[in-house]
Amino acid sequence: MKINAFGRTNLKVSGIGLGCVTFGREIDDSAAFRIMDHAFESGITLFDTAESYGGGEAGEYRRKVFGTEDVREVSQEYHSSERIIGDWLNAKRCREKIVLQTKMGL
């Protein structure tokens, strides 16, 4: 895996990142852990998430804005993607090896 400098910081990140938008939405905790395990073992060190990813809030947004009920969601928990990633980082004890990129809506 190619490793790149992250802007003008001292951070080094993998050339490919793992998008975690479906964690807690279409993908439950167990499957998400397997995906993160595989990504990390493959050299991916950049994980992308957002406070609006996962069940709950994302589903509520789609209901309000699009008038649709998303039956794919495995969780109605708000911020489930971030929680799942945090649980994985805690279980694997590898926080210092992962660059976690997140966003928040206002």
Image (tube, rainbow, N blue to C red):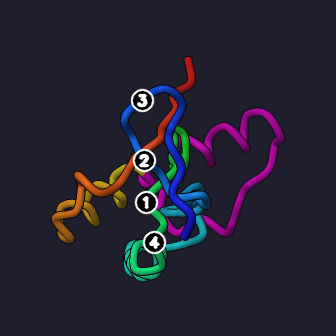
Q: Which residue is mark 4?
A: 43
The region drawn magenta spans 57-81
Look at the numbered disc 1 and give the secondary structure of its residue: loop
The image quadrant of residue 9 is top left
Mark closest to the chain's N terminus, 3 or 1: 3
Other residues around mark 2 within 10 Å, as few (<14) / some (14–19) / many (≥20): some
Q: Which residue is mark 1?
A: 45
Left-right relation of 38 to 2: left
Looking at this view, name the residue that lies furthest to the top.
Answer: 106
Mark closest to the chain's N terminus, 4 or 2: 2
Label 3 to label 1, Cα distance in Å? Answer: 16 Å
Label 4 to label 2, Cα distance in Å? Answer: 12 Å
Q: Are marks 2 and 1 in contact (CB under 8 Å)?
A: yes
Q: Residue at x 25, y 61 (%)?
A: 89
Other residues around mark 4 within 10 Å, as few (<14) / some (14–19) / many (≥20): some
Q: Which residue is mark 3?
A: 9
Which label sits in the foreground, 3 or 1?
3
